[in-house]
Image (spheres, coloured by chain):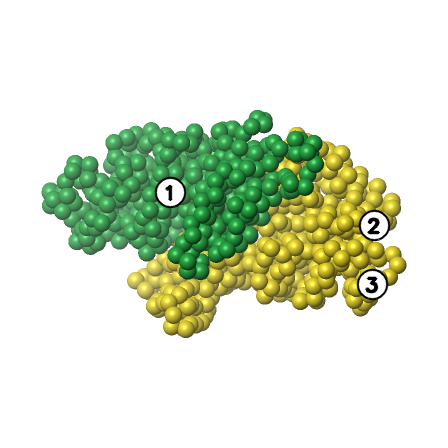
Chain colours: A green, B yellow
C-alpha cells in the first residue's frame, strides 16, 4: 500500500453565504483525521499522511438571487484511509457528507492504485463486438415488450421474432424476476434455443441478457446457474444491489459473459441539481469501474429524458481513455425508433448500442420487421444515404414502414 | 404464492399541467403488464391478476406558481410480479419510474405476505435492552472520535475512556475500514477487552458495534469473523451495499448480534423534495424491514440537520406497531450534547438512543466524564428534575461541566 496515493472527489455545494474555503478545509479534515489544528506537532507528523487535502475551490457567485451561489470543491483523500472496494471509497467521499446541506457529488478520480483493484468490464465494448463478430457498425439491441404473466412458449416466440429481425442483443425486462411461469433455468434455454433457430436464418450471432435477480448473497450462484443453462449475457439492476455486487460478478472468472447494467432506481440520485450523484459518474464512470460491459441510461429522445449534455458526458465516461479499464458500451434508451438512428449516431458516434422496445415491437409489420428496420437504418447511415432514400430502395420496406409510422428526426 | 396479494407504493409527482389520473393509470399498467386497453378480452382475463391498480390520486393544485402543483399517487402492485426480496420490490415500484420526471417515492406498504419474507431486526429495541439488562431508561451511545491513523493501544484507550463513562453502546466510525493498524480481528478483542475492564468498574454491560466492511460477497464471512473475535454488535453502511445485503445478514442465524445501520450516502436520496426516497421510508421503514436493530439518522439539533417532522416520521416508522417486525431503535445523531437530553426525550420519547461523538469527547473532563454527563442528564429527566438543578447536586459535576460548556437547550 503506497503512502502517497490520493483519490479525489469533486462536489458542487450551493450556499448563499458560506465561506467555501473554510468548508473545503472542514471536509478535508473532518472526513479523514477528524481534527487537525488542535493536534500537537508530533501527532501532526504522524497523522499528516492520513490527512485530506483541498485541491481546489472554485466559487461561482451567481446572480445574487438566493440559491444561485455555489462552489465546485475538489478534495484529495489518502488511499491509506479506505480499503480497495467501492463501498469503502463511496462512504469515505460521500457518506456523512451527502447529508451536509445542498451538496452533489459531481465526479471522482480514484488513484491509479485504487483503479487497479477494480475489475472494470470483463469484455468491454470491443470484447462484446468480438463475441458477436460485428466490428463495422453500431450494435442494435431489442427489449422484450410485455413479459410479466407470459409463459415460456409466448416468451420464446417473442424472443424469436426479435431475433429474426437481425438485432445483435436482446435483453430481458428489468422487472422480470424469478417466477413460476418463466424460471431462469427454463427461460434461458428457451430463449437461447430461439436465438439458434433465428441464427440459422439470419446467419447472425446474438447475446441474450438474462435478468440476474434474487438475494444478494445468491447472485453469483444464480449467475453461474444462468451460464450453465446457456446464458451468454446478464442484465443487472446494479443500483438496487450496490456497485460492489456488480464488481464481484465482473471479477468472477466463473461468470464468463458480458453484463449490461440497468439504471433502475438511478432517478433517485442523479436528477436533482442540489443533491445526489451526477449521471456521468453514477451511470458512466462508476458503472464502468464496477465492471459493466454495457450501461443503459435515459436517452435524450424519449419521454424519460436526460439533458443531452449529460447523456454525452455519460458516454464520455464509458468510453474515455483516461480509465485503465476496458470501455463500456453506452446504451441510450427510451423513445428510440428507426427514424432516430442518424441522430443517435451523430450524437453518440459509432461506439453505441441502438436500443429499442416500442420501436421494435410497435412496427406495423411486427417485431421481426422492427429489427430489420433498425438494421436498415444503421446501414443507411453507414452508406451515407438519407433514411428516406434508403427506404425507397427495394428490400428496405421495413424501414419505409417505420418511417411512415414514426417519421425521421434529425435534431 | 397468493394470487390476490398486492403491495402499494405512494409517490409525489410535481407537474404544472399533467393529467395525474392518466399518469397514474400509465404507471399501474406500464410497470406491470405493459399494455392493457389494446389487449383482447381473453388476454385481459388471463393478465388481470398481473395488472397494477390505481389506489388513489390526490391532486394539490398549489398556488398557481410554477412548480407548486403536485399529486400524491398510490399504486397497488400484484405480489405475483416480483420475488420476495427488496431489490425486486424496489426495482418494481421505483426502478424505471424513478427517472420519469419530478417524482419522489414517499412510502411503501408491502403485503403481509411480502413482509413475512423479510427478516426485520433479529433483536429489535427490546432485544438490545435485554442484552444490556437496561429496561428503564433511554440508552446512551458514544461514537469514536478520531480513528484513522490510530494504532490498537490508542484505540483501546479511547474505547476504555468512553466505556468508563457508563455508556451502553459504542460504535466504530463508519469510515474505519480494514487497515493494517487496526484490523478487525485485533480491533475487536482489544475493544471488547476494554469493555470488560470498564465493566469491572461500572458494573455495566456494553455493546460494541464494529464496522462491518469489505466486498459484498465477503460480508457474511467478515461478520462471522467479527463475532468469533468477540464482537457483540455490528455497524453497517447499508446504503453503500443495498438493503438486501443487510437482510441477508439479519436473516443469518450465525450472526447472532444486533446490527446498527449507518445512513452514509442517504443524503444522495432523501433531501430533495422532487426526487429520491423519503427519509422515513429510506432510514425508517426499509432499514427496519431489512433487519437493522438500530437506525442512525441526522438529528434535528446539529449542523447536519433533518427537519424535525421528518425526524419524527423516521422514528415512527422504526417503532410503529403496523409492521410485523420487531421495533428498531431510533438513533438521532449529530450535534448532541448533554444539555439536549431533555429535548431529545421530549421529542422522541423513551425508546431512543442518545448518541454523541463530540458531546462525549469534547467534555472538559474527557470522554469518561462526557459519558457520565449524559447518563446524569438522562437520570435528571427520568427523575423530573431540571438539568440545572440536578447538575448542582453533589456527584453530578460532570453534568455541571457539560452545561457550562454547551448550555441547555429546551426547544
Looking at the image, residue B300 sits to the left or right of residue B160; the answer is left
Looking at the image, residue A195 sits to the left or right of residue B376; the answer is left
Determine the CA span between mark 2 and mark 1.
54 Å
B353 or B80: nearer the eye?
A: B353
Residue under the point 78% across and 60% down: B378
The number of callouts visible is 3
Instruction: Report which quarter residue A377 is drawn in.
Output: top left
Determine the CA span between mark 1 and mark 3.
60 Å
Taking the image as drawn, is residue B359 in sight? yes
User: Are dots 2 and 1 on a single chain?
Assistant: no
A193 or B259: nearer the eye?
A: B259
Vertical relation: B290 (above or below) A54: below
Residue that mark 1 sits on: A314
Q: Position of residue A256 (x, y in %)?
A: 44, 31
Residue that mark 2 sits on: B204
Answer few, some or many: residues within 10 Å of disc 1's Cα (few below 14, many 20 plus, some between 14 and 19).
many
Answer few, some or many: residues within 10 Å of disc 2's Cα (few below 14, many 20 plus, some between 14 and 19).
some
Answer few, some or many: residues within 10 Å of disc 3's Cα (few below 14, many 20 plus, some between 14 and 19).
many
Determine the CA span between mark 3 and mark 2.
22 Å
Amino acid at each position: 500500500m503506497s503512502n502517497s496515493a490520493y483519490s479525489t472527489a469533486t462536489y458542487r455545494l450551493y450556499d448563499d453565504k458560506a465561506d467555501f474555503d473554510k468548508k473545503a478545509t472542514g471536509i478535508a479534515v473532518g472526513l479523514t483525521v477528524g481534527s487537525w489544528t488542535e493536534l500537537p506537532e508530533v501527532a501532526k507528523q504522524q497523522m499528516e499522511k492520513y490527512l485530506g487535502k483541498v485541491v481546489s475551490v472554485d466559487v461561482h457567485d451567481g446572480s445574487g438571487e438566493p440559491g444561485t451561489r455555489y462552489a465546485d470543491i475538489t478534495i484529495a483523500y489518502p488511499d491509506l484511509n479506505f480499503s480497495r472496494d467501492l463501498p469503502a471509497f463511496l462512504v469515505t467521499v460521500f457518506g456523512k457528507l451527502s447529508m451536509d446541506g445542498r451538496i452533489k457529488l459531481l465526479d471522482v478520480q480514484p488513484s491509479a492504485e485504487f483503479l487497479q483493484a477494480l475489475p472494470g468490464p470483463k469484455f468491454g465494448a470491443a470484447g462484446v463486438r468480438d463475441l458477436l463478430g460485428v466490428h463495422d457498425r453500431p450494435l442494435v439491441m431489442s427489449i422484450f415488450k410485455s413479459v410479466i404473466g407470459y409463459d415460456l412458449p409466448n416468451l420464446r416466440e417473442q424472443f424469436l421474432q426479435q431475433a429474426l429481425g437481425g438485432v445483435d442483443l436482446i435483453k430481458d425486462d428489468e422487472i422480470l424476476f424469478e417466477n413460476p411461469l418463466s424460471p431462469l433455468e427454463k427461460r434461458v434455454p428457451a430463449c437461447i434455443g430461439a436465438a439458434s433457430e433465428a441464427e440459422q436464418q439470419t446467419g447472425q450471432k446474438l447475446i441474450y441478457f438474462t435478468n440476474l435477480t434474487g438475494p444478494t448473497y445468491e447472485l453469483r450462484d444464480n449467475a453461474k446457474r444462468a451460464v450453465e443453462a446457456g446464458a451468454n449475457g446478464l442484465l443487472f439492476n446494479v443500483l438496487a444491489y450496490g456497485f460492489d455486487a456488480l464488481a464481484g460478478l465482473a471479477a468472477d472468472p466463473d461468470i464468463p459473459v458480458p453484463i449490461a447494467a440497468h439504471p433502475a432506481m438511478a432517478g433517485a440520485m442523479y436528477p436533482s441539481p442540489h443533491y445526489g450523484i451526477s449521471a456521468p459518474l453514477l451511470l458512466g464512470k462508476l458503472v464502468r469501474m464496477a465492471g459493466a460491459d454495457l450501461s443503459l441510461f435515459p436517452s435524450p429522445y424519449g419521454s424519460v429524458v436526460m439533458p443531452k449534455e449529460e447523456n454525452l458526458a455519460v458516454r464520455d465516461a464509458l468510453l474515455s481513455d483516461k480509465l485503465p479499464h476496458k470501455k463500456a458500451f453506452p446504451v441510450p434508451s427510451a423513445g428510440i425508433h428507426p427514424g432516430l438512428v442518424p441522430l443517435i449516431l451523430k450524437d453518440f458516434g459509432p461506439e453505441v448500442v441502438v436500443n429499442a422496445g416500442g420501436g421494435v415491437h410497435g412496427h406495423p409489420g411486427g417485431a421481426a420487421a422492427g429489427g430489420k428496420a433498425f438494421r436498415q437504418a444503421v446501414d443507411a447511415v453507414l452508406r451515407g444515404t438519407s433514411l428516406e432514400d434508403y427506404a425507397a430502395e427495394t428490400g428496405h420496406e421495413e424501414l419505409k414502414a417505420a418511417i411512415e409510422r414514426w417519421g425521421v428526426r434529425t435534431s
